[in-house]
Image: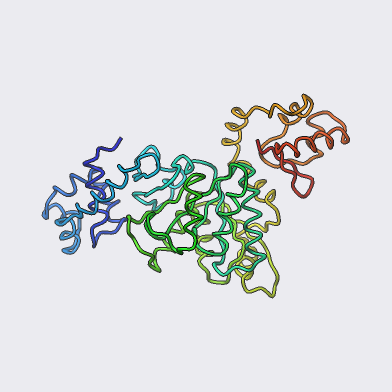
Amino acid sequence: MIPVNEQRARLAILISYGLSRSLFAQLMQQTDSAQVILSAGREQWRAWGLNEKQQTALSNPSWQEADKQLTWQEKNPSTQHIIFWDSPTYPTRLSAIADAPPVLWVRGDITTLTTPQIAIVGSRNASASGNKIAFDFAQEFAQSGMTVTSGLAGGIDAAAHAGALAAKDGQSIGVLGTGVDVMYPARNKPLAEQMLTRGAIISEFPLGSRAEAWHFPQRNRIISGLSLGILVVEAAENSGSLITARLALEQGREVFAIPGSIHNPLAKGCHQLIKRGQAKLSETVADVLSELSGQLRPFLREKTATSPPPDDLSDAAKKLLMQIPFEPMLGDDLIVKAKISAAECASLLLELEMSDSVEIYGGNKIARIR
């Protein structure tokens, strides 16, 4: 647990004008204490290589703003959180990227940040078919047990969040380019409110931060950093979604893209990623889950161990369900594994599908969803 005085000192430095997050990280490597940094004095600051502007910023830390942030957290500690990079609740995957945010503001269920996530990104001015694809894919991902992460912008982002929330027990995370108390665009506020009970909204920007053009490319590294992989649904050439894809590749994440019409300018970014070998062509959710299966196994093993079969199933269906993994597998392989006939397997799978225990995908693939 980080002492409150240390939290206060860190926030006072981070919010001070003239100090970047990268400089703050360097200073913390020197001392491991924001309180020590502030008390070091100008002679030591100069020895650390700080210029006059930076020294002046440390001489005038933003104590009032820091107190404002901590008061916000104290008002509702169950749903309003400030988490630092060395807090036990900081998401592990995000902490591993090169420029992980030193602090995150979170509203909602903080445990969602540690769930297996798939990012869905794309154009703010998406086509009707693009929005439907994002919605449908997100709903299937959520039904498969993955949390859907995006940027809570218009178009593909909003469709992806809505699709995840449409699934039973679906969860979604929105990464903002503003403070978590400022909703941009404002029309997404109802969607964000739903996410507070079925996920979270997060930001690296302090409370009250308004939308700035440079915030959004910067927040994209968090979207990809939290996720196992990203799916690009519709993206024009040189769009922000391609920035997210590039960041994902740099972070070692899997990148997927949905192809579209050669006449659709919003498909050109996806085609560009596929042609360059930077993204895997994806036509179904199963295509993505199959690629991510290795990374999902630790989560799926945990889920398998804690999820007994539904009580309303026949004994034969329960037995078959225990043979089905949470990652997609071929129906023919299931028949061999379960040592039953194709007809019996088809009958039992229908029972399992009717109870919402499995998902049937194209290409004769099946996955357990509860």
User: Where is residue 250 drawn, in percent x and y?
Assistant: 49, 56
User: Where is residue 257 drawn, in percent x and y?
Assistant: 63, 60
Task: Name the side, left or right, on which 204 lies relative to 23.
Answer: right
Color scheme of the displayed model: rainbow
In the depicted structure, whether residue 127 falls above or below residue 40: below
Residue furthest to the top:
315
Q: Which residue is located at x 30 percent, y 47 percent?
A: 72
User: Where is residue 215 drawn, in percent x and y?
Assistant: 39, 63
Q: Which residue is located at x 31 percent, y 56 percent?
A: 22
Specify the quadrant of the image occupied by residue 171: top right
How many labels were placed on the picture?
A: 0
In the depicted structure, whether residue 146 falls above or below residue 260: above
Instruction: Indicate the quadrant containing the C terminus: top left, top right, bottom left or bottom right.
Output: top right
User: Where is residue 53 drawn, in percent x and y?
Assistant: 18, 64
Task: Name the side, left or right, on which 22 lies relative to 96.
Answer: left
Q: Which residue is located at x 29 percent, y 59 percent?
A: 20
Task: Name the side, left or right, on which 239 lies relative to 361.
Answer: left
Instruction: Indicate the quadrant containing the N terminus: top left, top right, bottom left or bottom right.
Output: top left
Q: Which residue is located at x 45 percent, y 56 percent?
A: 221
In the depicted structure, whether residue 170 falls above or below residue 175: above
